[in-house]
Image: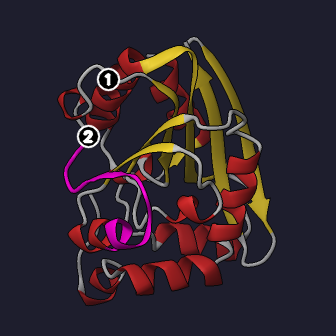
Amino acid sequence: MQRNNFLYNLLSHHFIYSTLQKVMSATTFRKKILNNFIKKKNSCVLDIGCGPAEILQDFKNLNYYGFDVNSNYINHAKKKYKGNFFCKKFEIKHVKKKKFDYVLMLGLIHHLSSKETDHLLVQIKKILKKNGKLLTLDNVLLKKQNLIAKTLIKLDRGKHVRNKNEYVELLKKRFKFIKLKIYNQKFIPYTYIVSHCSI
């Protein structure tokens, strides 16, 4: 779930959302993380909560499936990029028997309740290839944290921003191997938690 008022609703437009992501250095950060994560050429990638699918600017040779509930984001992605785009919540039935090298949940979990997150993780385990991996990236609250970062994170649209241990507990329920790292962005101050998960 996410907060709704006039200012938050402006972010539902792809141009405003993308501009803010660039201003906040989030676009550059995601690119850096993805460059270290997606190693295989022509990988089969599932992007849940894909937004305007801007990762396809830098990763052009993917067999890409993107899901988002925002029709403005998905319509923009369909016009600009090559891929399979769905304006709906992800369910296994939408990809049939497809198996994926990588599943992405970038900036998604802090919008979901624990029950919603667990439901997704159960499905993701079923569609990952043998050596497939899940990448999650979210904002995170820490005890000792830059005040500006903490303030900005508390203003996020997502209603379920968690601390490190809460994110870990969610992932541990379904994934055996978890590699996790906290990133403190200096400009503009912000804090991310990134996990690589495999079965």
**Disc 1 secondary structure class:** helix
Secondary-structure class at tag 2: loop
Q: Can residue 142 be seen in this snapshot? A: no
Q: Where is residue 103 in the image (x, y as percent from the top left)?
A: 49, 35
Please tell me how crowded label 2 is: few (under 14), some (14-19), or many (20+) other residues with Cα within 10 Å: many
Quadrant that contains the C terminus: top right
Three-letter amino acid code at disc 2?
Phe
Q: Can residue 130 be seen in this view?
A: yes
Question: Which one is in front, 197 or 147?
Answer: 197
Q: Is residue 115 left or right of residue 42?
A: left
The residue shown at (23%, 75%) is 4
Q: Position of residue 196 (x, y in %)?
A: 64, 31
Q: What stretch is highlighted in magenta?
A: 76-89
Tag 1: residue type?
A: Gln
Q: How is the image coloured?
A: secondary structure
Q: Which mark is residue 166?
A: none
The residue tagged 2 is 90
Q: Determine the residue located farthest toward the right in the rendered image.
A: 186
Identify the residue position indicated by label 1 in the image: 123
Q: Are marks 2 and 1 in contact (CB under 8 Å)?
A: yes
